[in-house]
Image: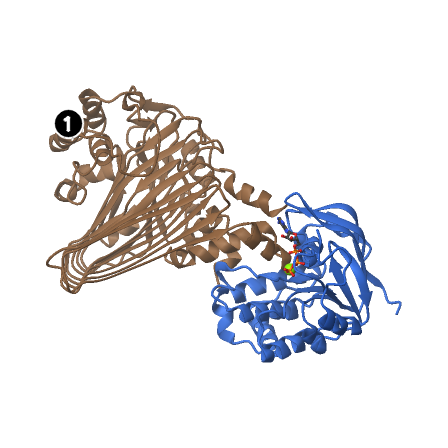
Chain colours: A blue, B brown
Amino acid sequence: MSSEILLQVEGLCARAAGNEILRGLDLTVRAGEVHAVMGPNGSGKSTLANVLAGRPGVEVTAGKVLYRGRNLVEMAPEERAREGIFLAFQYPVEIPGVTNLYFLKAAANAVRKHRGLEELDAMDFLSLARRKMKLVEMDEKMMSRAINEGFSGGEKKRNEVLQMAILEPVLSILDETDSGLDIDALGIVSRGVNSLRSAERSMIVITHYQRLLDHIVPDRVHVLAGGRIVRSGGKELALELEEQGYAWIEGGAGAA
Amino acid sequence: MSSADSLEHLATREYKWGFVTDIEADSVPPGLSEDVIRLISSRKGEPEWLLAWRLEAYRRWLTMPEPMWSTVRFPLIDYQSIVYYSAPKQKKKLESLDEVDPRLLETYEKLGIPLAEQKRLAGVAVDAVFDSVSVATTFREELSKKGILFCSFSDAVREHPDLVRKYLGSVVPYADNKHAALNSAVFSDGSFVYVPKGVRCPMELSTYFRINAANTGQFERTLIIADEGSYVSYLEGCTAPQRDENQLHAAVVELVALERAQIKYSTVQNWYPGDAEGRGGIYNFVTKRGKCLGRASKISWTQVETGSAITWKYPSCILVGDDSIGEFYSVALTANRQQADTGTKMIHIGKNTRSTVVSKGISTGHGQNTYRGQVRIQKGADGARNFSQCDSLLIGPECGAHTFPCLEVHNPTATVEHEATTSKIGEDQLFYCQQRGISAEDAVSMIVNGFCKQVLKELPMEFAVEAQKLLGVSLEGSVG
Ligand SMILES: Nc1ncnc2c1ncn2[C@@H]1O[C@H](COP(=O)(O)OP(=O)(O)OP(=O)(O)O)[C@@H](O)[C@H]1O
Ligand SMILES: [Mg+2]
């Protein structure tokens, strides 16, 4: 495969609250590819996702991150989002007082405006949202509730995928979107994710479980431990990890 | 802009109404004494009974302690350093608006309240109060055709002394609290409204209060009487110049609703709040109260409080008439070092009286926001009902919210419900919005707007627009 390089991470070191968390991470994602990132708890997977999305407080201390050739580190988080980077959060936050529908419309229009598209009015947006809700089999009632407020764990994850389906990002990062989902929901959410797969779009799927990768079949699987990618392989690697765990990693699991 | 910057920005928003109008003023020397009160009264050519009332109030004031029960903190006020009367110099008696000093007209135009005939806001009659006096009242003639009296308080004393004498102090007696006593002693002007039986006031009535002169307190009084079966919607707005010294604003508002009458009273309060370090700003100590005197009458308060260094006000309803209704909808925003202690009292006296309280407190920066409410169901108030909801929104780590609801139920048939929530907006929430392409600033607006929606929708349209601007809320969010 030699499609365009969408994301290039080289020698990335990052810290949060004074702790060195990523210590020389390399990762290349080409257009159309799905990369799975696995690894022990605390190894730095969410931190990688946060660096890519630009979370305040996570500081890049060395290395480079290029997104479509541009230095990602210099871009504001909202600009990255408008440029097509989407993070499905491991722990989506609740925002009281703002309805899901209103929020999604604001987000969709912010992205559309940036792309030079006309903003959608309430009616047009509603019909778009309805179509996408069907895709993830989400109840319309959830749209008139405050963002994630009182949502169950699984509903929050489904809401993340709904947002992703509406925003149609170029690079999606799914941080443990499968945890907390029941078996049926896992199938539904995976279908939603797969519907976005295309030759132009790429995904980084962070997960602990092989079963998600049965649904969303990755091109590459990486093992992140101690802030570095310690092993990469094809989809078989996930199966192997499922059997063996992380005991084989030199210096112990996720030694930090 | 990072989310932390944006939180900071919201906490230190600029005050755009801080200019001073350069106009010669006719003031009395600073300080408070019986002589000063006599002077104010004689300047205004008042009748003897009113002077006597003022002096009684003053003597009572001297004996009253400062109210210390609220959570607001500030140095003791030096009452002798305040100027109690300051009026822009103009010709003796104005025959028409054309005679108003152009600098005054310009001031109001700058504030977005054009008074001149051609430019007036459609459907809104305005009484413009500048420091201690009313400088203009629009649409007076049109309103008088329907028998509606809308004029400055001073004119009312001259032209409708019987009504003023009958109702002045009937809802807020001068001995009610220290600030009300001070107001009763020195009040200089304000607005007066009387809506006759069965008349539905065809336009919004409003008063725009402007403090201009330095070291001057503003002490205005508003009296609104809605006769049987009438309806009136009244709005007030306020701004003041940016100064390092605190200025005192101690107002009294009295509302009287007779049988089946309805009064809707809306406030957008935007007095100068002081700077980021807490220097300057208005002390806004206001006593507002309405009496639902007649059966099935209704008084509804809506307030958006964004200004003032300190806000201390509790617009209340005394539900005397059976089946009468009291409502209180409030948004109070405190940023920088602002303090707000606000809420309401709903006193149920008549049978089947109902009240609704919706309070939204937003704190950011080092702002402190207190809700203080009292619901009292008297013995005879069979079947009385109250619903109260108090929500607090904390934006950033340094601010605070406090709620003190107080319930007193003396009738077993009453139903009283109280709900309260506190939510925090931190960097995580803002980052979540940013990750979806929404700037931190827009995210804050969106969250604030969503939080206040329930109250903002109670405001008349023109005011809702104004209020949203003050809350830094984009207009788009309001509708839909
Ligand atoms: N803001 C922070 N302050 C302090 N420590 C942090 C911060 N963010 C991450 N860490 C630490 O960095 C390490 C990596 O965290 P990260 O969330 O990236 O792990 P993870 O691989 O996603 O783990 P999991 O599989 O449990 O989700 C952990 O030890 C975590 O405690
Ligand atoms: Mg994680």
Determine if the C-beta at disc 1 is less than 8 A from ligand 1.
no
Count every numbered label the image shows and give the total: 1
Q: Is residue B223 left or right of residue A175?
A: left
Q: Where, by quadrant of the figure, is residue B28 drawn? A: top left
The relative height of residue B343 versus residue B282 in the rendered view (above or below) is below
Q: Nearer the viewer, residue A59 or A192?
A: A59
Q: Residues within 10 Å of mark 1 (few under 14, many from 20)?
A: some
Q: Is residue B186 left or right of residue B461?
A: left
Disc 1 is attached to a residue of which chain?
B
Residue occupied by mark 1 = B59
**Residue B39 placement (x, y as % from top left):** 21, 23
Q: Residue at x 29, y 28 (%)?
A: B92
**Residue A61 placement (x, y as % from top left):** 74, 44
Q: Nearer the viewer, residue B39 or A233?
A: A233
Q: Which residue type does callout 1 highlight?
A: Arg
Could you tell me which quadrant the N terminus of chain A lies in? bottom right
Q: Where, by quadrant of the figure, is residue B43 drawn? A: top left
Q: Nearer the viewer, residue B34 or B102?
A: B34
**Residue B353 placement (x, y as % from top left):** 19, 61
Q: Kindly tell me whether residue B138 is visible in this rendering.
A: no
Q: Secondary structure at mark 1?
A: helix
The relative height of residue A158 versus residue B134 in the rendered view (above or below) is below
Q: Residue at x 18, y 22 (%)?
A: B34
Quadrant position of ligand 2: bottom right
Q: Kindly tell me whether residue A123 is visible in this rendering.
A: yes
**Residue B275 placement (x, y as % from top left):** 48, 32
